[in-house]
Amino acid sequence: MKKLAFLLGTLALALFGPIAAHAADAAADYPKSPISLVVVYTPGGATDFQARIASMLASDKKYFGQPMVVVNKPGAGGMTGWNWSVEKGPKDGYTIISYNMPHLAAQAIANKPSFTVESFEPLANWGADPAVLIVPKDSPYKTVKDLVEYAKANPGKVTVNGAGLLVGHHIATLQLEKAAGIKLTYIPEKGGTDAFQAVYSHKVIAGFNNLADAFRNTDNLNVLAIADVKRHPFLPDVPTFQELGYDVDDASVNFRGFCFVKGVPQEIVDKAADMSLRMFNDPMVAAKMKESGSPLHILNREDTKKMFQAQKAKLEVLLQTLVKK
């Protein structure tokens, strides 16, 4: 038996030793060329805008030492890009994917995409962006109560848009419908930028969008409430829905960060996770995020993995009560 074990061990070393050595060499040299950063939403929206800030120091030798090139793959509330990542995305560590929670988990639960939450390998989280209810500056609806009263008197006539189906904006809309006992007509747009433009131009009565985008556009709109459990320092005068008596919690808060599709060598995953975390914590990144009203919420790889699973568990329960089959 000892001789057999020795022979098997020798065979395993001969077969897998070179593979392990190659993986270690690849990780030691990683990265040796530019990295593609897949953003699954349209250019100019909060995810795209923040991803560019989060990755702006990638070429610094303190971090990746190589630039990150943003590649936009929008569509279907993020499903187009995430499906592509799982079906066709390289697994060599040179394609990083931006994730959005709860979007990714909600779509994996409610639809039948190519991906699940477990299809991705989280690296680090840079932010958490609450959804806010917005109306044009000249809207006759000055408060959430104004909008709810009109919606009660006119079921289905209040149009509310967001950056796609089963994104945080849609979840906040469904929560408001249930909490207020009203029927709204939700309009999914191609992304946050399109959603804002539709609100500005009065194509819809109201919209749910990202706090970060609202912060940069308060000259053109009014923010009626925030879908979170507490007020936010960037918009301190905006009340939460719960303050106003509506049971809308923080389920729609949009966590953003970097991930790989599953299958990237573990040594590269660990190295990219470390470099991402340190880059997100750079004071220059923090300053740019604050300047643009983009809330930071930095999590390391392990805490990001826990967040993925917590979001999945929460949405599995929540969507049963919100989404009509």
Image: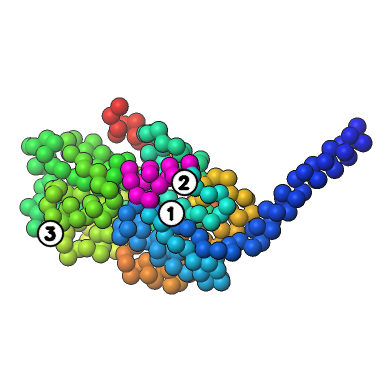
**Mark 2 — residue?**
85
Quadrant containing the N terminus is top right
Q: Could you tell me which secondary element the residue under label 3 belongs to?
A: loop
Q: Write the start and end of the magenta stretch as one range.
A: 73-87
Q: CA distance from mark 1 to mark 3?
A: 34 Å
Choose mark 1 or mark 3, whichever is in front. 1
Residue 170, picture quadrant: top left
**Mark 3 — residue?**
137
Location of residue 325 with respect to 34 vertically, above or below: above
The circle on residue 38 is: 1
Q: Could you tell me which secondary element the residue under label 1 belongs to?
A: strand
Which residue is at 55% across, 68% downward? 65
Q: As shown in the figure, which amino acid type bears the numbered disc 2?
A: Ser
Is residue 80 left or right of 133 when viewed as pictured? right
The answer to whether mark 2 and mark 1 are in CB contact below 8 A is yes
Q: As shown in the figure, which amino acid type bears the numbered disc 3?
A: Lys
Is residue 124 left or right of 105 when viewed as pictured? right
- Most frequent secondary structure within the magenta stretch: helix
Q: Is residue 243 visible?
A: no
Q: Is residue 275 visible?
A: yes
